[in-house]
Amino acid sequence: MLSEARRNLMCSEVKKNVNDRVVNQSSSIRRWLLNPRSLLVGYALIDLIWNFARIQLSVAKAFSDGIDLAYSPFYIHRWLDSLLLLLASVGLRLSRLWSYCAAIIASGWLLYRGVEKWERIAEYGLDLPLWSWPVVRSWWLHHSGQWDFPRLVLAVAVLAYCSISLTLSFLRKNIRLR
């Protein structure tokens, strides 16, 4: 009788430990998924898929209208901004020194491409000052500014976060070495 009571007690403890582990795993997965850096990776993936699909639809429409494009779906310059945002967000999410460096390079390149596009609009299209309202309006309405703006804002945030984290990491290592 005593051994049966012990066995029941041990079985209930084992079940409780298994249930606790499952609950801890699900809460850690939930915490990982709701982390802002993970949400940024999710947004970057959605942006990449959405941008790729949007490009494919416009190319399919052009082909159906009889316009012959020298186009490949891997014509990367059309969706490079989305790839750069994904690389920067994954680098931020990994939280390693090398990934911070990759994120800084990717977000810096994304910002450079955004400013370069802005300059082209100002110089060639309108011949106006760079930061004037007509340039902003033209960028927003005719040059997919509504898609570029979130990428550029997130690139600035990633660049700032990674730069600060990298600087603090180097400062901590230098302080430890002394």
Image (spheres, rainbow, N blue to C red):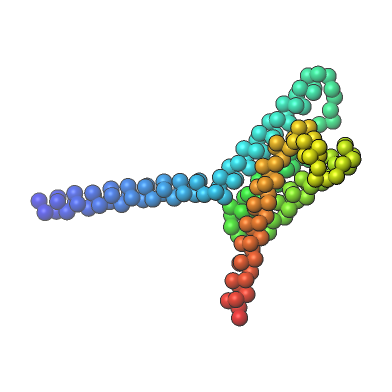
x and y, in percent, of residue 59 in the image: 77, 27
Relative horizontal placement of residue 176, taking residue 103 as reference (left or right) = left
Toward the bottom, the furthest residue is 178
x and y, in percent, of residue 137 in the image: 77, 36
x and y, in percent, of residue 58 in the image: 75, 26
Residue in the image at 58% along x and 76% along y: 176
Numbered label tally? 0
- The C terminus: image quadrant: bottom right
- Residue 70 against residue 3 in the figure, above or below: above
**Residue 119, quarter of picture:** top right
**Residue 126, quarter of picture:** top right
Asked if one can make out residue 162 in the rendered structure from this viewpoint, the answer is yes
The residue closer to the viewer here, 17 or 130, is: 130
**Residue 159, quarter of picture:** bottom right
Relative horizontal placement of residue 11, taking residue 105 as reference (left or right) = left
Asked if one can make out residue 74 in the rendered structure from this viewpoint, the answer is no
- Residue 42 against residue 174 in the figure, above or below: above
The residue closer to the viewer here, 94 or 174, is: 174
Toward the top, the furthest residue is 65
- Residue 14 against residue 43 in the figure, above or below: below
Residue in the image at 61% along x and 62% along y: 165
x and y, in percent, of residue 27 in the image: 41, 48
